[in-house]
Amino acid sequence: MTRLSIEADDTGRHTPIHGPEAIAALREAGRIAALTLDHIAPLIRPGISTAEIDHEADAFMRAAGAVAATIGYKGYAHASCISINHVAAHGIPSDTKRLKAGDIVNVDVTPLVDGWHGDTSRTFGVGRLPLKLKRLVLATFEAMWAGIDAVRPGARLGDIGAAIQARAAADRLTVLTSFCGHGTGRIFHDAPQVLHVGRAGDGMLLEPGMVFTIEPMLTTGRDRTTILPDGWTAVTADRAPTAQFEHTVAVTETGVEVLTLSPDDPSPRSWNFD
């Protein structure tokens, strides 16, 4: 049975506290989310269209017994969001958008499994990347993990944002503050709101059973985004490149469990930075 958190988040909402059965269901949704990204990873190459990647992600989720939660969500028509270079979020798959060497591309998927959401994204490199982009991708990955490492019962939401912000600052990068993480479960976007900047010790108390995403977006430019006329695609106003990684996590009695982690989860830590 799901109850609500003792404290409210900064929006005034209380967060669902999930029991063992719900966590198990979310773990399965997260597993399929991770495997979906594993499946499309070999397809990330010059010349492929973002529509082809989306089709493969959709087919994989359906074969796994899931449906893409994004299809029909507020009128969105695709199984994934695919964001290239200066597109910060919600890039719409298209037959005319083709990857080219030197691009970075984020693929974001959310399979819905028996009514439960698993939300994750990764940024991939296409062919040989400039060193500046490699460093951006790695720094974003490390910032996400800094946020995850701050999760434990008794911690505060602000601890997550502070950890991410500190890591970004150490790499002289900017956190895009227009977007944040969110609770998830039966509801796609639920409480709490998880900011990727903050002050340690501030914000809602974290309790075992909370489930939410940590999904920082970092850029080499300024903290300003704009939405294109399609109503979805968010781009950096200065067209600076941006990267994002996202995991869904559960607060446990002793720390944190990453629900969307794959055994084959590729890490930019292994990239050649020579």
Image (cartoon, rainbow, N blue to C red):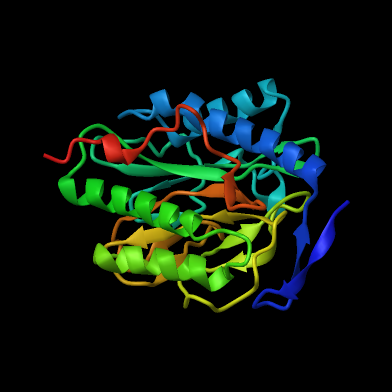
Total numbered labels = 0
Location of the C terminus by quadrant is top left
Q: Is residue 197 left or right of residue 257?
A: left
Q: Which residue corresponds to the image point at 50% horizontal and 44% vertical from the top-left?
A: 121
Q: Position of residue 147 (x, y in %)?
A: 47, 59
Q: Residue at x 26, y 66 (%)?
A: 170
> What residue is rendered at 49% in x and 60% in y?
150
**Along the viewing direction, whichever of 249 and 91 lies nearer the viewer:** 249
Question: Which residue of the protein is positioned furthest toward the right in this rendering?
Answer: 1
**Against 155, is 32 above or below?**
above
Residue 125 pos. (x, y %): 31, 38
Residue lying furthest top in this view? Answer: 63
In the picture, measured across the screen, residue 118 lies left or right of residue 151, that is: right
- Picture layout, residue 10 above or below residue 96: below
Q: Quadrant of residue 224?
A: bottom left
| Residue 1 visible here | yes
Q: Is residue 120 left or right of residue 222?
A: right
Q: Position of residue 62 (x, y in %)?
A: 68, 25
Q: Nearer the viewer, residue 232 or 89?
A: 89
Q: Which percent across, then down, holds residue 153?
A: 63, 61
- Work out whether residue 196 can be spotted: no
- Is 120 situated above or below 202? above
